[in-house]
C-alpha cells in the first residue's frame, strides 16, 4: 500500500476497531460474574475481554483522530477504487476467512463439542491457506501434520483456558 493511502486506510480501520472494541466491551459485561458462588468479582470471565475491548476501542479512537488530522476522512472512493478492492487477492482471503469463521460459529459451535469444533476449524483454516491443491498430498505431509498438531493444541489449550481458568461453560 502506498504511503499516501495510509490515512484513508487508518480511517476505515479505526472505525472497525472502535466498533469491535465496543462490542467486545458490551458482550463481556454480559458474561456471568459468579457472585452467587462467592467467587471474587475480579476473577469474573468478562474482566479480561472487557479490558481488552476497552483498549482496542481507545486505540481505535486515537487512530481515528490521527487519520482525520491527516485527511483520511476524505475517502475519494470511485468505481476504480471499488473494483481494485474487490479484485485484490487480500480481499478474497479476507472474505474467505469471514466465511470460514461464520460457518464455525453458526454451524459447528453448539452442535458438536466445542473442542472438536475448534480443532476442525483450525485444521480447515490451515489447510485452506497453506495447502496447495495443485500438488500431490504425499509431497505435503508436513502441512497436514502441522495443521493437525496446531488444531489439536489450539483446541485443547483454548478449551482448558476458558473452562478452568475463566470458568466459562463452553457449548456442546
Image: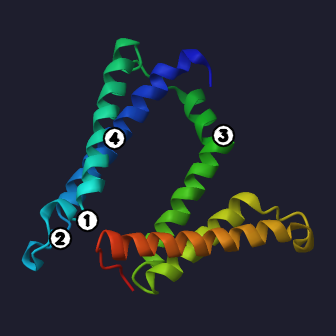
N-terminal-most mark, 3 or 4: 4
Q: Which of marks 1 and 3 is nearer the N terminus?
A: 1
**Residue hosting label 1:** 45
Position of residue 128 in the picture relative to residue 82 (left or right): right
> Is residue 150 shown to the viewer in this render?
yes
Locate residue 143: give its quadrant: bottom right
- Residue 124 located left or right of residue 161: right
Residue position marked by numbered label 2 in the rendering:
32
Say what secondary structure mark 4 lies in: helix
> Badge 2: few (under 14), some or many (20 or more) residues near its Cα, within 10 Å?
few
Give residue 109's quadrant in the image: bottom left
Q: Do the residues labelled 1 and 2 touch (CB within 8 Å)?
A: yes
Distance of mark 1 from mark 3, alpha carbons? 39 Å
Which badge, 1 or 4, comes first in the chain's sequence? 1
Foreground: disc 1 or disc 4: 1
Q: Give the mark nearer the N terminus: 2 vs 4.
A: 2
Query: In the picture, residue 16 is in which quadrant?
Result: top left
Which disc is residue 136 wearing? none
Q: Disc 1 to disc 2, how far (Cα)?
A: 7 Å
Q: Which of marks 2 and 3 is in front?
A: 2
User: At numbered mark 2, what does the secondary structure look like: helix, strand or loop?
Assistant: loop
Nearest the viewer among 46 and 63 is 46
Res. 88 mark: 3
Callout 3: 10 Å neighbours few (<14), some, many (20+)? few
Amino acid at each position: 500500500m502506498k504511503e499516501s493511502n495510509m490515512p484513508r486506510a487508518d480511517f476505515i480501520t479505526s472505525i472497525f476497531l472502535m466498533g469491535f472494541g465496543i462490542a467486545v466491551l458490551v458482550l463481556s459485561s454480559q458474561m456471568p460474574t459468579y457472585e452467587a458462588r462467592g467467587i471474587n468479582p475480579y476473577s469474573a470471565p468478562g474482566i479480561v475481554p472487557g479490558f481488552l475491548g476497552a483498549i482496542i476501542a481507545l486505540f481505535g479512537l486515537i487512530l481515528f483522530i490521527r487519520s482525520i488530522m491527516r485527511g483520511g476522512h476524505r475517502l475519494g472512493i470511485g468505481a476504480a477504487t471499488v473494483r481494485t478492492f474487490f479484485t485484490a487477492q487480500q480481499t478474497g482471503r479476507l472474505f474467505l476467512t469471514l466465511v470460514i469463521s461464520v460457518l464455525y460459529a453458526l454451524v459447528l459451535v453448539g452442535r458438536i463439542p466445542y473442542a472438536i469444533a475448534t480443532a476442525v476449524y483450525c485444521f480447515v483454516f490451515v489447510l485452506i491457506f497453506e495447502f496447495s491443491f495443485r500438488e500431490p498430498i504425499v509431497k505435503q505431509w508436513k502441512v497436514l501434520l502441522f495443521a493437525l498438531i496446531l488444531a489439536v493444541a489450539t483446541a485443547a489449550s483454548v478449551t482448558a483456558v476458558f473452562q478452568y481458568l475463566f470458568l466459562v461453560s463452553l457449548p456442546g
